[in-house]
Amino acid sequence: MEIAVRNYKTGDAEAVSALVNACHEADHARLAVSTEMLLKRAWDEASKPEEQLLVAVSEGRTVAFCDLVREEGTRLVSRLWILPEWRTSQTGRLLLERRVALAGAFPEPMLDVPVRPSQADQASLLGSMGFVHVRTWWRMRADLLRDLPAPALPAGFTFRDASTGVGTEALTSLVNDTFSEHWGEGIHSIGEVQRHLDSPGFDPHLLVFAESCQRPVGYVWSWIFRDQIELTGDACAFIGDLGVTTAYRHRGLGRALLLHALNAVKVHGMQAAELEVDGPNASALHLYRSVGFQESDELRWYRRELQTPSRPILQAQSPEH
């Protein structure tokens, strides 16, 4: 059957949300999205959704979807959702070919695509199109239906949450000081951080700083996505960011912030918490396991260097093991 790849339109939201949910179910992901969520977010990561998002259609049926997240100056990230019965067809290749062609218009030098182990066909497709497996991340989950240790900060440090005010410029500086050297991260802009602060799911009580002399030196940023919880029945919070600036590491601040976050989301009725961690980050893995997190899902990153009008294509890097 003929497959047409085109740009996303607002009227596609219902079909796309059904497609995404069917893929999550097939891949055993505890995730869900409603049409309202899709429209509300407007795929917030895409600055121009109707230019940056792609759908594949066959005989009027939406069979695949591809988003695009631009991490300015660092990389482009795309995720693919393909209906299970269409995964052995040319659908994925046509979608990726269009994505790669459009990605060349951006200044970012690389395109990354995450794949779960169950998506072997997608991994094979990526390999055949010049993508290389460069990294593995873990999604980890902790049960909160147990007694949790109280957070204990070292002497001279205090907690403060964002309900008392947060300066976007200072927060952006803290985020960059903490994460700029991490794999897959770049320099975050003030506008990008502000979009997160302005998003409907932001709760200032769940953005918590560890401070020394009233200066933030670490933070944890948690999220409770009520709309997704209503769809899945899974009362699980997400620990989005946890970091401490280089000069203040190895003092127990990361553990104290993490335990503060877990206790806080438990008070909000959460029964579990999840987070994502870079596979080679042994110290982070040790910390998360020490408070009860266990690996629940694997995410393999495939990368292709891009050719743009001002930059020739680069040789792909060897995969890291």
Image: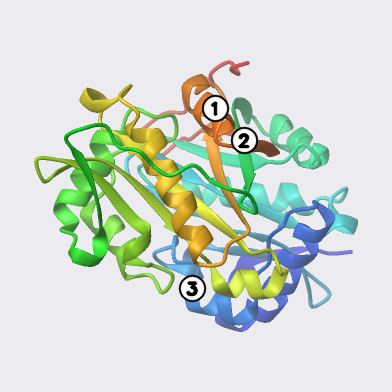
Q: Nearer the viewer, residue 88 or 149?
A: 149
Q: Is residue 317 above or below residue 216?
A: above
Q: Residue at x 53, y 18 (%)?
A: 317
Does residue 281 appear left or right of residue 318 in this picture?
A: left
Q: Are marks 3 and 1 in contact (CB under 8 Å)?
A: no
Q: Is residue 230 above or below residue 45?
A: below
Residue marked by disc 3:
42
Mark 1 or mark 3, which is nearer the start of the sequence? Answer: 3
SS at mark 3? loop
Name the residue beneath numbered marker 1. Answer: 285
Earlier sequence position, callout 2 versus callout 3? 3
Q: Is residue 93 left or right of residue 1?
A: left
Amino acid type of the residue tagged 1 in the rendering: Leu
**Nearer the N terminus, badge 1 or badge 2?**
2
Judge the density around disc 1: few (<14), some (14-19), many (≥20) Cα neighbours within 10 Å: some
**Residue 223 locus on image (x, y percent):** 46, 60
